[in-house]
Amino acid sequence: MSQLREESIPVESTDVSVSMLRSGYPYISDRLRRWGTEAFQARLLGRPTVFLRGRSAAQMFYDNTKFTRVGAIPPPVRGTLFGKGTVHGLDGSAHHHRKAMFLGLLDDEATAEITRLTRSRWQRSLPERGPRRPIVLFDESVRILAGAVSEWAGMAVNHPKFPGHARDLAMIVDGFGSVGLRQIRARMARLRCRAWARSYIRAVRNGTLAPRQDTAVSVIARHRDHRNRRLPLDTAADELLNILRPTVAVAWFVTFAALALHDHPRWREPLAAGDAQAVRAFTQEVRRFFPFAPALAAWPRREFVWRGHGFRRGTRVVLDLYGTNHDPAIWRDAGYFDPSRFVDWEPDAFELIPQGGGEPDVGHRCPGEPLTIALLEQAVTVLARTRTRWAAQRLTYSLSRIPSRVSSGVVLLPYDSAP
């Protein structure tokens, strides 16, 4: 134990849970900047916790020989966002086996199909001549994304109750980092969505529904774990939601992309022209610059030392995703929106981490990240080509709200309507 140099980590003596909730995304980086260090320790939800940011920290955090994710996600977040027994909380062979199912489902063919289904919906909603009616872009994005991914998954999207399911998927995301009424609404939405997903899993298993074998509904209903056991009904339902929900969450990035286009109109022309390099650069900068997932947690598997900082089992470790995406050691002028930073440069797996770091096939990086990028690239192009007017509205977002979103949802008017 003598080799652990815990004195090298600044320690905050109080529990920082409330302060972190109030400050939101900048909390970890503000403390690290204050102490001029790469890490600090405090208590979070009553447990000793080490907070980290940066490329080296991300590389260390995603070393599976050093960390486990089992039980690391705080219960309020896990219960609201992911569900019990799902891939996000597994480790080792159990995680590898379950992750392979997701990687198999969310392959290049699936990305192309979901993108195709989304494109047809965007064309009806936002044709190049502009919308036929005023729309709230956030709500429209939720409807479009939920419809496309659910149809691909093998679920009925023309059912009268489907619009409510789409709103519930968004409500789950909207409440994961909150307390109070927003958290309660998110929990209730998860229960409703779980019942909806469970009805499909049960119908496949009892033979009353026979979707194509390659649909998400069919694959998840029939999936067996690393010990050849069928997934419990609720777990299977939650895993189905863990495909639908992250796809709907792209709506947050779509509205941020619209805001970025509004504030940086010089990018509209190359985006509208379909310049692939410009589209990719703009999309990546939206994912880097704007807030979404704030941080991730893990437990050390064993004692070890990293850059003079000692880690022990039982001490939670939190990696600051938002802070790493704004780390001045990685990003020049990190506080400015500048897509040109991605022209002729591709960050590695530990520098740009809005959906986690490392490699998706061996670690915990989101397997749906390529789909997120494809859907956002598509939306960016649609927005750049569409003729609209912007209603008078509050184009603000709060860094203390998790997840943050544009206050107005971005209200777009038909191009020929009165301003």
Image (tube, helix red, strand yellow):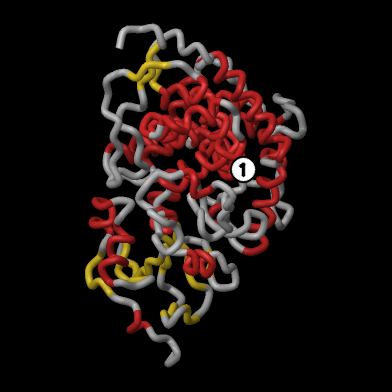
Q: Nearer the viewer, residue 93 or 8?
A: 8
The kind of residue tagged 1 is Pro
Q: Nearer the viewer, residue 225 or 8?
A: 8
Camera sees residue 171: no
Up the image or down, 416 lies above or below 72; here it is above
Camera sees residue 216: yes
Can you give x and y, in whole percent of width and height, for residue 107 in the image?
Answer: 70, 41
Up the image or down, 366 lies above or below 418; here it is below
Task: Judge from the rendering whether residue 125 lies leftward or rightward of residue 407; answer left or right.
Answer: right
Q: Nearer the viewer, residue 144 or 350?
A: 350
Q: Residue at x 49, y 23 (%)?
A: 143
Q: Residue at x 30, y 72 (%)?
A: 36
Question: Which residue is denoted by mark 1 in the rendering?
Answer: 370
Can you give x and y, in whole percent of width and height, for residue 147 in the image?
Answer: 56, 23
Can you give x and y, in whole percent of width and height, for residue 11 in the image?
Answer: 28, 75
Q: Residue at x 37, y 42 (%)?
A: 403
Question: Looking at the rendering, in which quadrant would you find the N terminus?
Answer: bottom left
